[in-house]
Image (cartoon, rainbow, N blue to C red):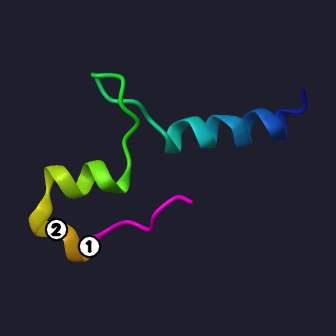
Amino acid sequence: MQPGALAHKRFILARFEVDEWGNRRSPQCIDTLFPNKRHKRLPSIS
């Protein structure tokens, strides 16, 4: 595996960081935790 591919994989894993309960953090989770910040919503990952 090339170093570039590994770095890319690490970036993907960091983006889908898992919380203490084993759930992937996502814009939906952030919305649920901070509904008053809905206008600052992160772009959804399709």
Residue at 32% x, 29% y is: 19
Q: Label 1 amino acid?
A: Lys
Is 18 colored magenta in this rendering? no
Tell me the residue that label 1 is attached to.
40
Residue at 37% x, 41% y is: 25
Disc 2, SS:
helix
Q: Label 2 amino acid?
A: Lys
Residue 34, picture quadrant: bottom left
Is 42 colored magenta in this rendering? yes
Outermost residue on the bottom side: it is 39
Query: Measured along the vertical axis of the image, is residue 40 above or below residue 29?
Result: below
Pointer 1 and pointer 2: residues touching (CB < 8 Å)?
yes
Q: Which residues are magenta?
A: 41-46
Residue at 61% x, 42% y is: 12
Mark 1 and mark 2: span between their CA atoms? 5 Å
Which quadrant would the N terminus be assigned to in this image? Answer: top right
